[in-house]
Image (cartoon, grey):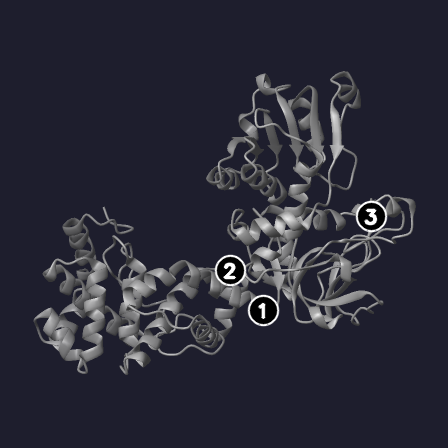
Amino acid sequence: MRALFFNGEKLCLVDLPRPDRPEGWVMIKVKLAGICNTDLEILRGYMDFRGVPGHEFVGEVVEGPKEILGKRVVGEINVSCGKCDMCRRGLKKHCRNIRILGMKDLNGTFGEYIVLPEENVHILPDNIPDEEAVFVEPLAAAFQVLEQVHIPPTSKVMILGDGKLGLLISKVFSYSGIPHVCVGKHEKKLEKARKWGARTLLLSDISENMFGEYDVVVDATGRENGLKLAVSFVRPQGMIVLKTTVKGSPPVNVSQIAVKEITLIGSRCGPFEPAIRALESGKIVVKDMIDSVFDLEDFQEAFERAKGSLLTPVLMSQDKALSFLISKNFSIIKNELTELFGFEPDRKVLIKKLEGDLLKPWVGSARCSEYECFVYIKLGKDSEKILRHELMHVYLTLWGRKNDVPVPLWVHEGLAGWFERIPGKIFFPAFLKPVDPISFSDYPSKESILKSFYFSCAHFFFFLDKRIPLKENFRELLEMVKHEKNWKKAIGDLLKEDFEAFHKRWFSHVKLVSFLISFGARCYNSSVEGCE
């Protein structure tokens, strides 16, 4: 199996045999695996671990009891002996002989297969998608704070850290009705916290009059100086919950903890049940926190991204990475597409065709070769824009099949460009930029762009004359597409002149594009990027 192996110095992609499955254990094929700060610390020497890291995952049981074969599962990471004094007292995650998935004596989730005791496995409800299920383990760790500490709603509470764990704790506190302030270094990350009701504060805006003011401070910074900050903010006889695990020694004046009579509580893994229930009910939503999707082979870029990202990139196979991006974009625009076209094709058929279009060489007015397309997708360069654009093409193809209408390629380009400009913007294909309206140097086919532009102009005059809303006009254009067989004549009719004459006139007066954009913007008070 493919796996990422850490030898104490560097992380490498290697081939390893599948792990042996002891009696009472299950073998799981990993579908998604998240990178968290602990994984980054392991690469710095935390826990002195050697092996396959990773512990946040969702997978499918491929070996084990018949009743759970094929089930989607998540798993608790602590494997206890069941015999020592800690286990007998019910403190299994503090077992004297503990093994920890991806951290201590047990290979983790950055490989294709893992093994875990059956008692560690939790079967997932069907309505929790894989992309959210991978958050169960860190979300459980966030819930653990409330398992350990009773926080009255009148308490002054601060969460230090705007990384993944800090934001998940903030979500849990908001879900539980606990007012709090989230402190971090990144405005974009804090903006997310404000959406679910947290107050936020940039660390650079902290003033000394805030020191010693908070009843409870949660350190989720993932940094060595996090505890020092927490000691400054907590009031005398207040409480600090320490969620940070780092390689190194925090620079803390421990006498301050004694003098202020601070209660310091370490907090680690938590209960899976409330985390799963919160995701199942939709009361806690985490999908918006996913930063990026990478294939296992691209682990170096994934880890670099994780060091500064809002949240964990997710490692998966290349096909899965592509499917994720496609699904994400489909979810965003499917309501618009359904409204525009008046029908919604089967999701699986749509995605399958879109994957096929992106995984084969592009032709005609393609904007990049097969190789370049893979580069876009794997490196995330305009990948969402490309997929959004192509999804429109596929939707139009399926619409054409449904209505038994052959739709020319350049009509595809025109309608897709129209779609990308709604609502509130004058329609032009994406490649006709207002600041540089006519430029063929970066595109393979001048003819295809000309054809697309003809149709674009036809659309423009069509809705300009009719004075009708853009979306309604799109439906009328679809009706025209459905019934029109002579496209040159159709464009000529809409332009109220001969198609070939328009061709010659436009080709010799390229500034027409800028005129149309600025004129349209004035007529409809629409904002077109690059236009005054």
Q: Relative to the observer, which residue lies in front, 208 or 375?
A: 208
Label 2 sits on what residue type? Answer: Gly
**Taking 311 as reference, is 149 above or below it?**
above
Dot 2: element: loop
What is the number of the mark on residue 318? 1
Task: Identify the residue under disc 3.
Answer: 92
Label 1 sits on what residue type? Answer: Gln
**How busy is the neighbourhood of tag 2: few (under 14 within 10 Å), some, or many (20 plus)?**
some
Please identify the quarter of the rendering in which residue 517 is found. bottom left
Mark 3 in CB contact with mark 1 (< 8 angstroms)? no
Mark 3 in CB contact with mark 2 (< 8 angstroms)? no
Say left or right for 361 vs 417. right
Q: Viewer-nearest of labels 3 and 1?
A: 3
Distance, label 1 to label 2, CA atoms, is: 13 Å
Distance, label 3 to label 1, CA atoms, is: 37 Å
Q: Relative to the observer, which residue lies in front, 340 or 496?
A: 340
Dot 1: element: helix
Residue 429 in view here: no
Mark 1 in CB contact with mark 2 (< 8 angstroms)? no
Q: Relative to the observer, which residue lies in front, 44 or 172?
A: 172
Say left or right for 527 vs 502. right
Please identify the quarter of the rendering in which residue 236 is found. top right
Distance, label 3 to label 2, CA atoms, is: 42 Å
Label 3 sits on what residue type? Answer: Lys
Q: Relative to the observer, which residue lies in front, 141 or 202?
A: 141
On-image quarter of the N terminus: bottom right
Task: Identify the residue under disc 2.
Answer: 380
Q: Earlier in the sequence, mark 1 or mark 2?
A: 1
Q: Name which residue lies at 83% across and 45% down.
A: 90
**How busy is the neighbourhood of tag 1: few (under 14 within 10 Å), some, or many (20 plus)?**
some
Say left or right for 397 vs 452. right
